Image: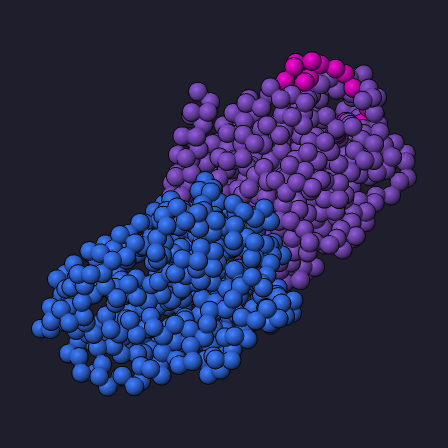
Amino acid sequence: MQETNISPANLEMCLKCNICTDVCPMYAVNPAYPGPKQAGPDGERYRLKDPEFFDAALKYCLNCKRCEVACPSGVKVADIIAVNRLKYGKPSHPLRDRMLASTDFVGSMASPFAPVANPVLGLGVTKSVMDGVLGISEHRTFPKYSSKKFVTWFKRHAAEQEQFPRQIHYFHGCYVNYNYPQLGKDFVRLMNACGYGVKLLEKEKCCGVALIANGFGDQATKQAKINLESIGKADTEVLTTSSTCSFTMRDEYEGVLGLDNSKQRNKILLTTKWLFDKIEAGEIKLAFKEDFKMKAAYHTACHMSKMGWQQYSIRLLKMIPGLELTVLGQHCCGISGTFGFKKENYEFSKEIGQTLFDDIKAAAPETVITDCETCKWQIEQFTKVPTFNPINILAQAIDFEKTQTLNAN
Amino acid sequence: MKTEYDVIIIGGGATGAGTARDCAMRGLKTLLVERADIADGASGRNHGLLHSGARYAVNDRESAAECIGENLILRRIAASCVEPTEGLFITLPEDDLAYQAKFVECCKAAGIKAEAIDPKLALRLEPEINPEIIGAVKVPDASVDPFRLVAANVLDARLHGADILTGWEVVEFIKEMVTITGVRIRNVKTGETKAVRAHYTVNAAGIWGAHIAELAGAHIGMLPSKGALLVFGHRAAKMVINRCRKPANADILVPGDVVSVIGTTSDKVPFEECDDMKVTRREVEILLTEGSKLVPSLASTRIIRAYAGVRPLVADDSDPSGRNVSRGIVLLDHSTRDGIRGFISITGGKLTTYRLMAEMTTDLICRKLGLERPCETAIKPLPGSEKEAERLPKKTWSVGQKAAFGRHGGLVGEMDFKSSEEICECEHVTRGEIAYAVRELGVKTLDDLRRRTRVGMGTCQSSFCVLRAAKVLAEELGTPEAAEQLAKDFLRERWKGIKPVCWGDQIREAEHMRNLYKEAFK
């Protein structure tokens, strides 16, 4: 007889218990969203009969994957939803969605004009035009573009990096490259302190998370293939400083785009996980500045909890003697990447994040720490508390010389 | 309800319901009596296959020709119950490919459009079939929802003035000399009895028709043949998949609404077992092993249920040994056959040919009554299947409303979808659909409701909807205190089908269900 049941995305392992619906942040605030069970396995049985059963309300799924984390049966609830959105969904605002999804393209266009682009994007008149014409919420401000791309900076330092006896690859991602090169620089500094020189991939494309979310599956697949090829060629692990980039390349390439990433998956790691493991194994030692003092709160990004990696970041941060760290309860911040930028989603986005914002206010930290760049935007907008990546904090907190000496041999 | 009718029909299966509709449409005062619920017997326990006739083409050309004729009619008049999935007859390496040529030839002779296609094309049409096939024939098979087909016939019969009595059984025939002038019926639940009279009484009770005939003083040699089937949790293939060989066990896989059904087996069973069919482990093994040869993924697809029906096979009247079985339609005029007037039996046949059986029966009655009224069941669509239904603005509908349309066609117009609250989430059954079914489709129990709406037919087998559904049904029936009993009865009925296939994901589900209700129903 049958020993195991196999079904696409574990569709049939669903016992219909509704735990996924109970944890869904969108279901809690939006009555138009049928919830993950209905949108996922329940809807899937009917869509297999007739694609006409595709429900446009699936666009509300945040792809936070909390349903999958909660599911006691291992159903890939959000993958089912994401795959169907790619197959049957239509962008509600094609031009806007294309623009929001093309982080790579828009970034490379905006960066050279950053001194002009940033103030213009911040202007009230621009915002109301974007709101009216493009459907981008006027309450949102785009993350500032950097006038110098991370990659440009890195090229000037690539030769020094080659001098290190040990090497590690870095997948910087769009946000580091176009908006926030400082995070990339902090990463390089931290790796150098640990005795590692940094290499970039032969070719790097946007991981594609925004393309997947906005329904551009073909383009996402094209970029994913380029990334997988480069990662396959890399002779070391490939580290990222973004939980979402890691998650997308590890899980979404296979589960949503249907690509075989089995050879690359285990090489793609978030820096905090890699670093923690190395410290545990005694291969890397960190020394911290004696005068470093900070009161911070750590927010677990949804994709972090999907990977189950928040503990690495938290325990790493807890190694810093001068850091007073509050670990916040696991609540979605509500932005979900480009989702929160869309005019029609702004209120949901804000409402979903409210519990988190309240918790942050209660903890009253100087800074919030999180592994996700879009959580950072959301938290900064609604709490005004400056928000950083654990790598920023570690780079600030280590005693560079001492650490370098500890890791010299 | 009247006490005098032109026709009384015994049996609320497809044949009885179809006959009631035909009689009522021809202006006859009609009563349908069913001891349990409509489509409770073999009509609700089969593949849900609208035969193209191809399966019978080689051995029984007459049946094959009847099937294709009815297939084409039902696609029109029962559009809301039929899904034109089309079918394939595939030849596996272990089968004789020479049979395929003969098969195609016989199909053509019976008027069935059968087209041998390249196995590679077949795999493109239906990627789930066994990739090792050496031959494939495309035929106009389709999927038909037997519950809704019977319900639509009953509804239309009622709309044409027929009375429908479910939960009443025939206990005695009322005879005047050699003429049957009516029946005494008993309410199964209360035991109340009453007499109803009619010019003609039609026995359309399927396998139970043997017993009915005995009550009337006639004998029909019937051979109960059990057929077991398995239900898979989702659609494993979108076309009807048949094995191109001499008909045998487990060689048809049908996409039935959102599930797939493999069947059947064929075993003689004693009459005593017909009321309580249990699927055995051996049957499950045969179905799974043979089914996986058609569509390999079945070997690992979750099975949510097993069930069995009884074919009413009729021994050929011309063969005194009773061993020769007629697979075609059997219409018995007992006045010429047995000297019993006013009594007609209609049996044999298939779900696909139910309408033709009804037409033949009603023709005979009209002839006897000296009426010249043409049959219109082949041209007038069933309720919900009218052409206008196709033009409804489905794009803007909720999933629950779309699912209800799939089940009731144009009748969704009579349902209230103001609330999108789903009572059964697996099958997207909303409160409005349940209210409609109770109001218009004669629902008394949750099992009746299941046959009208798919409540509790999904992968959780009612684990999560049974209490909600019981409450809503009890309220709609006006007996809120009955809710708990309704729920218990339904859980028991569901368990019967789960038990033979309780492993894999289904055993987790069953354990979950048991733990939920062992507390709730202490």
Q: Which chain is blue?
A: A
Residue at far left of view: A409
Residue depicted at 51% across the width and 80% down the height: A116
In the picture shown, does residue A110 fall above or below B274?
A: below
Q: Position of residue B459 (x, y in %)?
A: 49, 42
In the picture shown, does residue A400 fall above or below B359?
A: below
Q: Position of residue B312 (x, y in %)?
A: 61, 36
Q: Which chain is purple?
A: B
Quarter of the picture containing the C terminus of chain A is: bottom left
In the picture shown, does residue B279 fall above or below A226?
A: above
Residue A271 sits in which quadrant?
bottom left
Residue B34 sits in which quadrant?
top right
Please name whichever residue, B92 or A196, is drawn nearer the observer in this view of the structure.
Answer: A196
Q: Is residue A391 left or right of residue B392?
A: left
> Is residue B207 found inside the magenta-colored segment of the image?
yes
Q: Position of residue B355 (x, y in %)?
A: 73, 43
| Whether residue B362 can be seen here | no
Residue depicted at 62% across the width and 33% down the height: B449
| Whether residue B359 can be seen here | yes
Residue at far front of view: A291
- Residues in magenta? B186-210
